[in-house]
Image: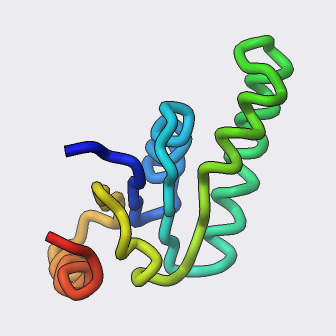
Amino acid sequence: MSITRVGIIGSGIMGAGIAEVAAANGHDVVLRSRSKDGADAMVAGLAKSLAKQVEKGKRNVEEAAEIRRRLHATTELADLAESDFVIETVVEDLVVKMELFRALDAVVRP
């Protein structure tokens, strides 16, 4: 199975870190946050991280821009529908996870 598009649920530290690594490795990434503020904060954090990497000479400006271009933040679970692989990084609460996976089953392909 070829993985082109990665879906990530959760925009906290773990989700944002996974999103950055996946995008840096050439995957298109859709990161779903519960709120627009969370999604915006994750995008801002990624921009800051990439800017630091450019400043330190670890990446060039073009690489950083390409990584940023591959990442899309959303609040809609339906935006994960075309993902080849989905990773969840939500709070460690079984009820929350069960509800999430029920909703996700209705959206993503097997």
Taking the spot 69% from the left edge, 46% from the top edge, the residue there is 68
Above or below for 19 versus 60: below
- Where is residue 12 shown, x and y percent of the image? 51, 57
Closer to us: 107 or 54: 107
Q: Quadrant of the N terminus?
A: top left
Above or below for 3 versus 78: above
Above or below for 76 versus 43: below
Closer to us: 48 or 77: 77
Taking the spot 41% from the left edge, 54% from the top edge, the residue there is 5
- Report which quarter residue 43 is drawn in: bottom right
Q: Residue furthest front?
A: 2
Taking the spot 28% from the left edge, 83% from the top edge, the residue there is 107
Above or below for 106 versus 65: below
**In the drawing, does residue 3 fall left or right of residue 62?**
left
- Where is residue 23 shown, x and y percent of the image? 54, 41
Taking the spot 47% from the left edge, 43% from the top edge, the residue there is 27
- Where is residue 6 shown, x and y percent of the image? 39, 54
For the image shown, how many numbered marks are present on the structure? 0
Q: Residue furthest top?
A: 57
The image's colouring method is rainbow
- Where is residue 30 shown, x and y percent of the image? 50, 62
Q: Quadrant of the C terminus?
A: bottom left
